[in-house]
Amino acid sequence: MPDTPSPAVLISEVGPRDGLQSVKAVMPTADKFKWIDALYAAGLREIEVASFVPARLLPQMADAADVVRHALTLPGLTVLALVPNLRGAQAALAAGVHKLTIPVSASAAHSLANVRKTREEMIAEVRNIVALRNEVAPSVPVEAGIATAFGCTLQGEVREDDVVWLATQVIEAGAEESGLSDTTGMANPAQVRRLFNKVRAAIGERTGAAHMHNTRGLGLANCLAAWDVGVRAFDASLAGLGGCPFAPGASGNVVTEDLVFMFEAMGVRTGIDLEQLIAARAPLMAGLPGEPVYGMTPQAGLPKGFVQGAAHV
Ligand code: ZN
């Protein structure tokens, strides 16, 4: 391998999970394979490929185990799955995932609505999942992402003390890392800086990724704010797939193409080839005909003479 330094940031693609579970249409399994292959070809090395939930709740994820099995054939890819409970964790570990992510809501109202459990019950569930992991797959890290960390559509404001408390609790329960998710697209950059600083003061290097949504157009600004205070892992979704049922026309997750462009233009290496990343939109659109896609960089194209900081392998 030539003298390619390792990336300065980890971009974790969540489209096949967060994106697909937010759209009504069901992408055929074969199209998911092509899409994941294209993301991998562009240089993404962590992809959240599925959510292990009952198919009657999310038919988009009925093929989760097949998608995991396919993703496992791509060398060097960290195959991540979301699991809301112990049963999901059992299925995900049986399928062979490399990493688990568990959503834990800082909003008491959102926790009950989303997983029908109190926050305390979810902390206990994290402990149960960690115990299972220790038994059957001790090398698989568990991430507990704090959902609704920056506000909640149901209860409104979420106290920062609640977020710090919950992040501390899930680490005590055995999770390896805890990141912050702006599930509802309510965060602003000042809040992002303040809350990540508070969480890092509490759990140090176990502070995980920034998971930002672009509902109000602040996705990139919030990622940059997180970068400013030392966050080096970011979730994003190709073409901003996801949308928001409560805000017509608004995109969902921060757009991977725009996030990669921002970092590369700043000279921050992502390990991702922008042209190949933009090309990965084709299999996504083929698998979800008619679904709106977002992203400013793919629309405008790369600036004349733009050279990425890296040769890609
Ligand atoms: Zn999300």
Image (tube, rainbow, N blue to C red):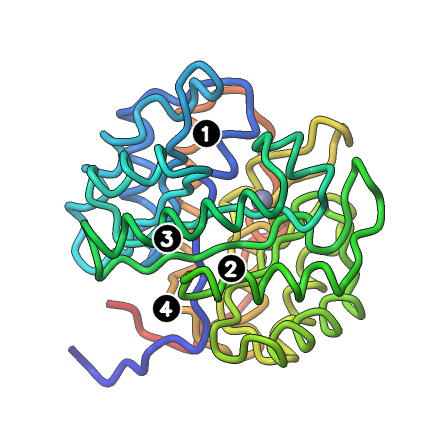
**Which residue has dot 3 on it?**
276
Mark 4 residue element: loop
User: Looking at the image, which residue is at 25% across and 38% down?
Assistant: 68
Q: Mark 2 against mark 4, which lies toward the viewer?
A: 2
Mark 1 residue element: helix
- Measured as percent of width and height from the top left, residue 312 is found at 29, 69
Dot placed on the residue nearer the N-terminal end, 4 or 3: 4
Compute the Cα span from label 2 to label 3: 37 Å
Q: Mark 2 against mark 3, which lies toward the viewer?
A: 2
Dot placed on the residue nearer the N-terminal end, 1 or 3: 3
* Residue 24, picture quadrant: top right
Dot placed on the residue nearer the N-terminal end, 2 or 1: 2
**Which residue has dot 4 on it?**
271
Compute the Cα span from label 1 to label 3: 15 Å
* Amino acid, disc 3: Gln
* Amino acid, disc 4: Gly
Q: Mark 4 against mark 3, which lies toward the viewer?
A: 4
Residue 170's disc number: 2
- Measured as percent of width and height from the top left, residue 101 is found at 43, 50
Compute the Cα span from label 4 to label 3: 12 Å
